[in-house]
Amino acid sequence: MEAAPHSALMDSIYRNQRHIYDLTRRYYLLGRDHLIAELSPPAKGTVLEIGCGTGRNLIAALRHHSAADYFGMDISNEMLETAAASAARAGVADRIRFAQGDATCFDPQSAFGIETFDRVFMSYTISMIPVWKDAIADAMRHVKPGGSLHLVDFGQQERLPGWFRGLLFKWLDLFHVTPRADMRDVLAAEAERSGATLQFQSLYRGYAWYGVITMPGAEA
């Protein structure tokens, strides 16, 4: 799907949902806080969230790791409007910069004047991106040597009842959300291609999957 039509689709989905997004998603976007706690960016490091949505994760990450600088991009201008308002309400508008962009071809140099980051993360993003493998490959380009890419998203519910998996997947499909069964294989291939290492965890009996690709080289 081309960027412009996908942007319009996301805006249409979130034009109203964005006002209640954080309240409702807290109950089923599990693993986000696990990812945030494990980011551990270096002092004065840089952190980029791809698909930042309402800004909830960036605000939480800043509170957890206050010595870093934070950046967020999203394809939906509706979500970015909410993210900027959320950052202002939290009193951190001067600590987080936002930009509109496509996760498959984002140019952070043009948006932020920064080419690579110490930490890049994607939280429940790849399940909503049609060409999600391209988005992961593009995200890898934005990670500094020694830095890391962190991803959390829906797993395959492998240790949960089959009826639960069936109901969840049908419900997610209503929102154009598709859990990626080959997420681990794709991350492993990207890690091998870059000479990086992959750590992968199945969380909450397979409800969520969490992967970290650490690039070779010295930490900034």
Image: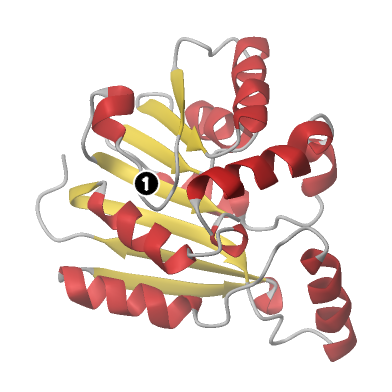
Residue 181, picture quadrant? bottom right
Q: Is residue 210 above or below residue 123?
A: below
Q: Amino acid at mark 1?
A: Val
Q: Dot 1: what SS?
A: strand
Find residue 50 and report its horizontal and vertical position in percent: 46, 44
The spot of residue 1 in percent (x, y) is: 54, 59
Q: Residue at (53%, 33%) from the top-left corner?
A: 58
The residue beneath circle 1 is 120
* Image side of residue 34 versus residue 170, left or right: left
Q: Position of residue 104 (x, y in %)?
A: 40, 53
- Where's residue 201, x and y in %? 50, 73
Q: Nearer the viewer, residue 14 or 186?
A: 14
Q: Residue at x 86, y 67 (%)?
A: 171
Name the residue: 41% across, 29% down: 71
Residue at point 36%, 24% (across, down): 67
Q: How is the image coloured?
A: secondary structure
Instruction: Give the image quarter of residue 176.
Output: bottom right
Q: Is residue 94 above or below residue 96?
A: above
